[in-house]
Image (spheres, rainbow, N blue to C red):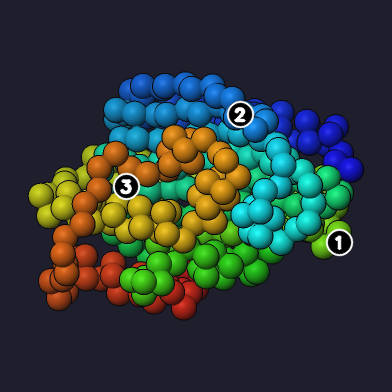
């Protein structure tokens, strides 16, 4: 049986996280247009999608809350490796695509699943996708994530960081998506974790999202952008699209569970492009970034940089 009282607690907490993120990002950006779209899922549940656009810093942002439920169909049963009959899932996810290519893309997601056989688990993470890799910025980002993990006994940066390295990679390009972050999934499914403690960690992590991004974005908002920078930004956005459509498990779960397509694909940028057989000039900032991203497939110890 599902614990509906705990599920309701998680849903309310995730809604609150979404509201606080919106407020903090609007205060930081100062010029955002926020479009709100509440929606219902025919199979059960619904959500609240907020799209941020045309800001001073953020070109497009998507912050989505969902609380869905329904029957476990055959594709979903295969993906979840379960024989349960019904599921409920709730989560909040956020993706920000900046105007300036010197400001990074960032993604955050926390989610909770429960099945009618009593199984439950949490998943989520945060990762950073700079258009240009700056080692000192990557180090500061990872220091912030380690600090969050260190506050919670159920979280282990030393485990979650390489998990992110493995997950946020683009195998067909032999590149990492960015400088990684932390990633975790199925925490609690083995019955060994305290679910309140895992929820507290998820709320702490998600609650730090806006503050972490402001620190990584603010110093670079006014940096000069050349035509070459803009071209490179479009190419890196293309890589982001490739990962989300080909490899991202959250995208696949949303589609096979009968989720709302517009909200599932809100993480994609408005503009991206692909150049056939692009070759970075040796010694250029683009070539240096590609070198870091190729190293990132095996994992880079950013805290040691």
Q: Nearer the viewer, residue 122 or 230?
A: 122
Q: For mark 2, does the 10 Å Cα neighbourhood hold few (<14), some (14 to 19), or many (20 or more) residues?
A: few
Which dot, 1 or 3, sits closer to the camera? 1
| Residue for badge 3 | 103
| Residue for badge 2 | 42
Q: Nearer the viewer, residue 235 or 135?
A: 235
Which of the labelled discs sits on residue 205, or is there none? none
* Image x and y of residue 55, in percent: 31, 28
* Image x and y of residue 121, in percent: 75, 52
* Image x and y of residue 187, in percent: 74, 58
| Residue for badge 1 | 192
Which dot, 3 or 2, sits closer to the camera? 2
Q: Residue at x 79, y 47 (%)?
A: 85
Q: Nearer the viewer, residue 175 or 262?
A: 262
Q: For mark 3, does the 10 Å Cα neighbourhood hold few (<14), some (14 to 19), or many (20 or more) residues?
A: many
Res. 282 visible in picture? yes
Looking at marks 1 and 3 on the same chain, the residue that comes earlier in the sequence is marked by 3
Looking at this view, name the residue that lies furthest to the right.
1
Q: Nearer the viewer, residue 16 or 169?
A: 169
Looking at this view, name the residue that lies furthest to the front.
74
What's the distance in space between the residues labelled 1 and 2, CA to CA?
34 Å
Q: Residue at x 60, y 29 (%)?
A: 41
Q: Residue at x 43, y 54 (%)?
A: 244
Q: Residue at x 42, y 21 (%)?
A: 35
* Image x and y of residue 274, in percent: 21, 57
């Amino acid at each position: 049986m599902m614990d509906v009282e705990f599920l309701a607690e998680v849903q309310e907490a995730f809604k609150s996280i979404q509201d606080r993120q919106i407020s903090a990002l609007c205060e930081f950006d100062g010029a955002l247009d926020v479009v709100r779209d509440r929606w219902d899922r025919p199979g059960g549940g619904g959500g609240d999608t907020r799209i941020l656009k045309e800001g001073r810093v953020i070109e497009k942002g998507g912050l989505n809350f969902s609380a869905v439920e329904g029957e476990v169909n055959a594709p979903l049963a295969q993906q979840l490796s379960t024989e349960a009959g019904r599921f409920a899932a709730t989560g909040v996810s956020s993706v920000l695509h900046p105007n300036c290519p010197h400001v990074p893309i960032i993604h955050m997601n926390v989610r909770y699943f429960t099945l009618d056989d009593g199984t439950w688990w949490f998943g989520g993470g945060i990762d950073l996708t700079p258009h240009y890799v700056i080692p000192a910025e990557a180090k500061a980002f990872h220091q912030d994530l380690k600090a969050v993990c260190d506050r919670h006994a159920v979280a282990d940066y030393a485990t979650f960081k390489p998990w992110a390295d493995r997950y946020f990679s683009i195998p067909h390009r032999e590149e990492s998506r960015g400088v990684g972050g932390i990633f975790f999934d199925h925490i609690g499914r083995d019955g060994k974790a305290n679910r309140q403690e895992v929820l507290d960690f998820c709320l702490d992590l998600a609650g730090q999202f806006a503050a972490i991004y402001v620190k990584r974005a603010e110093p670079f908002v006014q940096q000069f952008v050349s035509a070459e920078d803009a071209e490179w930004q479009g190419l890196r956005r293309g890589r982001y699209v490739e990962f989300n459509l080909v490899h991202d498990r959250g995208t696949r779960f949303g589609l096979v569970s009968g989720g709302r397509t517009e909200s599932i694909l809100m993480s994609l940028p408005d503009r991206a492009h692909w150049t056939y057989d692009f070759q970075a000039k040796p010694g250029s900032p683009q070539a240096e970034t590609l070198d870091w991203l190729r190293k990132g497939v095996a994992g880079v110890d950013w805290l040691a940089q």
